Image: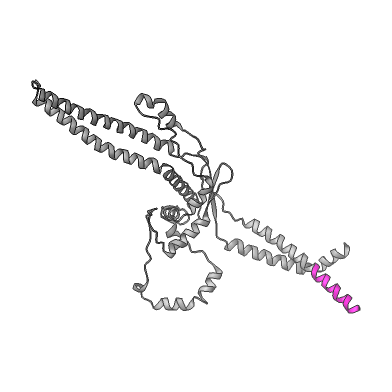
Amino acid sequence: MVELFQTFWSKRILIAKIVGAFLVLGLLIALLSPDEYTASATLMPEAQSSQGRAGNLLQQYGGILGIGSGGNVAGDNIPPSLYPDIMGSIPYQVELMNQPVYFSKYDTTVNPHVFFSEIHKPFNLMGFIKSYTIGLPGKIIGLFRSSGDKEIEPVITEVDRDSVLRISKSQMGTINKLKSRLTVNTEGNTITINSEFPDPQAAAEIAQNGIVLLKEYVRDYRTQKANEDLKYVEEQLASAKKRFEAAQQKLAEFRDSNVSLATAKARTREQELQSQYDLAFEIYNSLNQRREQARLQVQEQTPVFSVLQPVSVPLNDNSSGLLILIVSAILGSFIALGWVLVQGWWQNEKNRFKEI
């Protein structure tokens, strides 16, 4: 033990140099590392249930209003395990990157695509070396190329989820950045959404935008069939209303022109018009009731997310300069002590080999 202490003491200058080198390296990392802020929120999706409030209302008062209960009106829930796939889809990411966000450090409001392609240009040592070695010929050619020769990439701002998308290279780059910066964890009965950005306000706003978009996608899936039924019923109701009003008008005109109804032919005609009126009214009334039922079905199938932990603007960045220095000092100390031990062992082995 004494010999080991003497060995370390004799090599104290070397150990100090190695630890100092690691401290300098840690200081450079702390100074050059870009600030990153993380905002998070915790949600609890709606539990699977056979019937909600709108369904109960329909069951209790449907008979009084002349509306059938329609059976089980609740739709199938989307399992939370599919939320990462939804948030990673290209339509979702395109809509997210085109929403305006306020960047407090730059005092500007732009969408994430503009921020990453025009504003946020972090220093990358390897990229800098590559651009001025391998990419130097391309830079030289670019100096002599006129601005009119540059190809303008299409920028998609609105997304039709049922159409074929054509994404530019710059937008795909933004999508890849957003995928790595906006993540979702679906462990247990809750979902946690994390947003990491080089600006605290932007991190919070993008997390909130991501939550709103996720709710929209889940709601659209759950209510798609009910909305299509409602649209169809409203179209049929509009046609039935026109037929009912036409039958009502014919019956009123006939009665105005035949007040006494003296002949059997007139009475027969009135009965015919009355039958047409009754039938048109019955169809119109039935469709009107069906529309109310369809509206309740849309409300019943609309999912509800309970916010357990809302989004808040982060106060501190993720990286800690003091922590980096401490880790660098500890790592440097271990490497220095290991180096001294290995060097001492190797010296002893060399001396023993010479003695032999």
Query: Is 13 located above or below residue 321 in the figure?
Result: below
In magenta segment, residue 167: no
Q: How is the image coloured?
A: one colour
Residue 325 or 300: which is nearer the viewer?
300
Could you tell me what secondary structure mostly forms the magenta stretch?
helix
Residue 34 or 220: which is nearer the viewer?
220
Does residue 197 appear anywhere in the picture?
no
Write the residue at 48% across / 55% down.
Answer: 105
* The C terminus lies in quadrant: bottom right
Does residue 85 appear anywhere in the picture?
yes
Query: Is 212 located above or below residue 332 in the figure?
Result: above
Q: Where does the image place residue 242, in percent across and percent down from the top left?
A: 21, 36
Residues shaded magenta:
341-355
Q: Where does the image place residue 274, in percent across and percent down from the top left?
A: 19, 26
Write the residue at 34% across / 26% down.
Answer: 66
Q: Residue furthest right?
A: 356
